Image (tube, grey):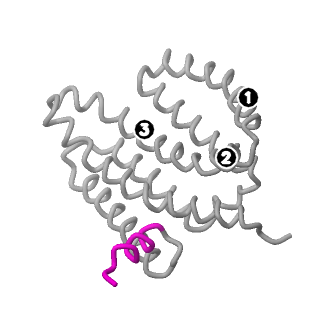
Amino acid sequence: MGATPADEATRNAFRNLELLITPLALFAMLALKPFLIVWIGSPLAAACAPVGMVLITGFWFNSCGHVPYARLIGSGRPDVVVKLTLIQFPPYLALLYIAIHYAGVVGAAVVWSLRAFVELLLLLAATSQLRLLSGAIVQSAFLVLAASTIALLTPFPSPIGTGSLFVFLMISLMRVVAQARTQPSFTLARLARAWKPH
């Protein structure tokens, strides 16, 4: 069975979104610790930065979930969204309670990010688009997860941690540029054509 126009629109929207938010997430990880050190000082920054890193990762998954979510709403199936939310709610609350008890705020952030990932999987499954999690999208997920792991494990300032985050950011930006050059439907390519003098 061939792909429908809705399938193609979903794929393009998903790929465009994940390509655009990946460098934003990586830049936020790179800038988070220095920003917190300047804003609230090193002691508090050391305690708050891990929470921020985990939440940025969850933000990436949550942002990707907006595409299949919008498709379900637009196709007149808000009931599916409600059912998926109700399915997640009991285990989410249970894990949240356990995580807060044993790991505090960091545990709560981990569970929220995990919920965002599970919700993305459920929404893609509900729209029959799970295959979107292959190929280039896996690359973006790997970049975000690897960056957050390195940022959590290395103190600031750390040449290894900062350098790794910078390299990941450059890789994600190069992917955006390559996509804009080769894919006419890419959001940035459309914007460039719209602003090009006639």
Give the magenta part as a residue range.
187-198
> Label 1 amino acid?
Ile
Please name the residue shown 53% across and 42% down the image: 62
Q: Which residue is mark 1?
A: 87
Q: Quadrant of residue 153?
A: top left
176 w.r.t. 138: above or below: below
> Label 3 amino acid?
Val
Q: What element does badge 2 sit on?
A: helix
Q: Position of residue 148 (x, y in %)?
A: 40, 47
Please name the residue shown 52% across and 22% down the image: 99
Q: Which label is found at residue 121?
A: 2
Mark 1 / mark 2, whichever is N-terminal? 1
Q: Which label is found at residue 63?
A: none
Please name the residue shown 72% across and 37% down the image: 78
Q: What element does badge 1 sit on?
A: helix
Q: Which residue is mark 3?
A: 54
